[in-house]
Image (cartoon, rainbow, N blue to C red):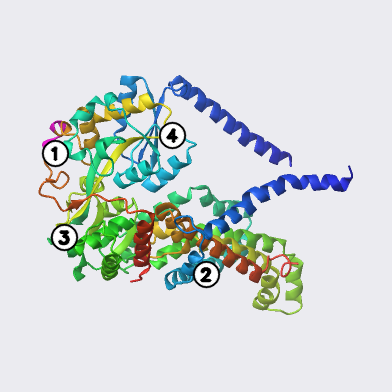
């Protein structure tokens, strides 16, 4: 009994001391006292040097938190409770958050650097006139393939994945919209299709892909492809850039039938306490030099027109990651299909996953 | 106040706990399971659970949980038996428990590297002349990693049951002419059945709703009800359906607990 009490006391004291030290350290570094900006972003999605620079330049302290899916992020913001001053949701999530009154309107006078954004990335259907959001990164969904493992075969289209030679060679990302979208595009349908007959047809087509699918995974797809666990992966463009930089036998292609064009935009959620700091942070990230530095670090494509000039030629000129959007008219942005349709997409995707080899 | 009344007051903290964290969540879950995606009353969720896709998923969940429990028991019982016979019991027990101090996700991630095409396991197979095999994203790796994670929960209750077994009973059996095998079969095993049941429950029930390992190690080639619950709550936001599966799982577990008994009444004493 005595030892039990001693044990509890030791744990209690250790926790208390650690909390006290954290508090003192935070105070010493200037956190607390309303001088912080809490940024809620995807994991591994910013150059940490920029955060330090922002802190030095403006005097605000940044608390950086990460999420791994739009849904998890929205759930946390909808609950309230925690303070987030800036968040970075994707296109369809933004329209959903606007619908549910989770965002505060932006003050464009406090965002002078907005002028550097390529006009085609402004005023998009998910947020007309950019009342609530400004672009952070954009990209596509496509195929990463290992030239060596495929013996010189090249991949140019979604339908190439159904090649019987590719048995057990494909890794898919665990996302219903991505995988269903791929099947819809391969059939010539829109990836926002809501016709149930078309969706059923896409699901049947996916079933025929199953013998070629090695696994359906999350973020670990980057590690697995870089380690040559499989020859082909369906991934987001920025992940592709990161994998290719680790293994130069890999290449990336946006399939010719069409694919998803997506945007991650910066927003100020309604949980924000430091609205001024949030605007300062957004404006800082919109600065062409900062945007270029960030794009070089993260690997996704920057929507900042002026930033392209600061990027090395081999990045800014890489058509795989900066496709000519005029000729790439086949790229579509996800529309918010509504809860019911999204549930249907997920149901079909779950059924597809249930197929055994 | 009488002593008896005082004793009832001691129950208050537990009672509050019970209402807030046991009864209320179950009531909420039940309530949620009768709502459709738009928040209207419905029994459609329960109809959906009875469609082939969810029944199949349930069958898989039970099958894999059964396999994991069986393998854990087959390895766990001899291990526990051997542990009671060793000299440095505490040290060996500590070594058994040690991996539990490492974060679960970290252990699972380690297997991604170990079981990979160019991983340690395949290098070993190669030197043995078996040649590289696909280990990752197979049923084998899923069961292996799950057993690795759950085995302490199987060994500990069995070990405790064996420790409590008076050695004099074994001596008596041997004196009366029973062979070692008969002694084990007729004396040791029946008397430690309580520990076996407790261990099986501690493994089977969490194994039934595993979800993270199904994606990381099995690459979603094994889909259990846990995966479906996760997807309904986080991605689809169809909480009603997620809640329904959870309710069905709880009902199934209740049935199992009743069928196997709590392990106290019979067996051990």
Q: Position of residue A237 (x, y in %)?
A: 22, 48
In the rendered image, which residue does mark 1 sit on?
A316
Helix, strand or loop for disc 3: loop
- Dot 4: chain letter: A
Q: Which residues are magenta?
A: A309-313
Which class describes the residues within 10 Å of circle 3: few (<14), some (14-19), or many (20+)? Answer: some
Q: Residue at x 14, y 57 (%)?
A: A256
Q: Vertically, is B254 above or below A144?
A: below
Q: Residue at x 12, y 60 (%)?
A: A152
Helix, strand or loop for disc 1: helix
- Dividing the picture into quarters, in which one does residue A4 lie? top right
In the rendered image, which residue does mark 2 sit on?
B66
Helix, strand or loop for disc 4: loop
Whole-angstrom CA distance, mark 4 to mark 2, is: 46 Å
In the rendered image, which residue does mark 3 sit on?
A157
| Whether marks 3 and 1 lie on the same chain | yes
Q: Position of residue A327 (x, y in %)?
A: 10, 49
């Amino acid at each position: 009994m005595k030892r039990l009490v001693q044990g509890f006391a030791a744990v209690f004291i250790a926790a208390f001391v650690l909390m006290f030290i954290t508090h003192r350290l935070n105070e010493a570094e200037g956190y607390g006292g309303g001088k912080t900006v809490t940024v809620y972003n995807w994991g591994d999605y910013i150059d940490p040097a920029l955060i330090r620079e922002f802190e030095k330049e403006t005097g605000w302290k940044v608390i950086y938190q990460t999420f791994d899916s739009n849904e998890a992020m929205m759930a946390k913001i909808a609950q309230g409770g925690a303070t987030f001053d800036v968040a970075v949701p994707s296109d369809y999530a933004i329209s959903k958050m606007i619908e549910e009154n989770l965002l505060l309107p932006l003050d464009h006078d406090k965002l002078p650097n907005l002028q550097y954004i390529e006009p085609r990335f402004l005023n998009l259907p998910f947020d007309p006139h950019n009342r609530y959001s400004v672009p952070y990164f954009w990209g596509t969904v496509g195929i990463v393939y290992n030239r060596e493992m495929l013996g010189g075969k090249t991949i140019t289209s979604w339908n190439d994945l159904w090649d019987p030679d590719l048995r057990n060679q494909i890794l898919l990302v665990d996302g219903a919209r991505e995988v269903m979208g791929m099947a819809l595009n391969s059939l010539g349908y829109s990836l926002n299709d809501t016709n149930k007959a078309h969706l059923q047809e896409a699901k049947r087509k996916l079933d025929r892909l199953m013998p070629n699918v090695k696994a359906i995974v999350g973020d670990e797809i980057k590690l697995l492809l870089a380690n040559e666990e499989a020859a082909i992966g369906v991934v987001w463009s920025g992940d592709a850039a990161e994998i290719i930089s680790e293994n130069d036998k890999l290449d990336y292609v946006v399939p010719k039938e069409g694919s998803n064009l997506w945007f991650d935009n910066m927003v100020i959620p309604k949980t924000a306490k430091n609205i001024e700091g949030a605007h300062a942070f957004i404006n800082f990230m919109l600065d062409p030099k900062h945007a270029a530095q960030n794009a070089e670090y993260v690997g996704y494509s920057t929507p900042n027109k002026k930033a392209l000039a600061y990027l090395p030629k081999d990045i800014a000129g890489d058509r795989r990651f900066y496709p000519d959007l005029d000729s790439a008219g086949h790229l579509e942005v996800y529309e918010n299909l509504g809860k019911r349709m999204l549930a249907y997409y997920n149901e079909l995707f779950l059924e597809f996953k249930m197929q055994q080899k | 106040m009488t002593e008896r009344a005082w004793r009832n007051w001691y129950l208050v903290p537990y009672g509050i706990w019970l209402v807030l964290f046991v009864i209320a969540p179950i009531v909420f879950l039940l309530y949620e399971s009768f709502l459709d995606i738009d928040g209207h009353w419905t029994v459609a969720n329960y109809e959906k659970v009875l469609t082939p896709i969810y029944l199949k998923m349930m069958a898989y969940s039970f099958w894999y949980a059964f396999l994991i429990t069986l393998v854990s028991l087959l390895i766990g019982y001899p291990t526990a038996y051997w542990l009671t016979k060793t000299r440095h019991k505490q040290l060996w027990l500590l070594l058994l428990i040690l991996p539990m101090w490492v974060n679960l996700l970290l252990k699972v991630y380690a297997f991604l590297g170990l079981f990979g095409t160019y991983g340690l396991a395949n290098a070993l197979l190669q030197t043995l002349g078996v040649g590289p095999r696909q280990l990752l994203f197979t049923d084998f790796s899923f069961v292996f990693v799950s057993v690795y994670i759950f085995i302490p929960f199987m060994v500990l209750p069995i070990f405790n049951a064996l420790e409590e077994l008076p050695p004099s009973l074994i001596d008596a059996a041997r004196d009366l002419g029973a062979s070692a095998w008969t002694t084990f079969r007729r004396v040791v095993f029946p008397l430690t059945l309580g520990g076996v049941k407790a261990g099986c429950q501690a493994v089977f029930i969490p194994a039934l709703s595993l979800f993270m390992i199904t994606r990381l190690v099995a690459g979603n080639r094994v889909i259990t009800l846990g995966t479906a619950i996760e997807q309904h709550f986080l991605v689809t936001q169809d909480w009603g359906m997620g809640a329904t599966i959870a309710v069905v799982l709880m009902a199934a577990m209740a049935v199992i607990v009743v069928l196997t008994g709590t392990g106290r009444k019979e067996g051990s004493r």
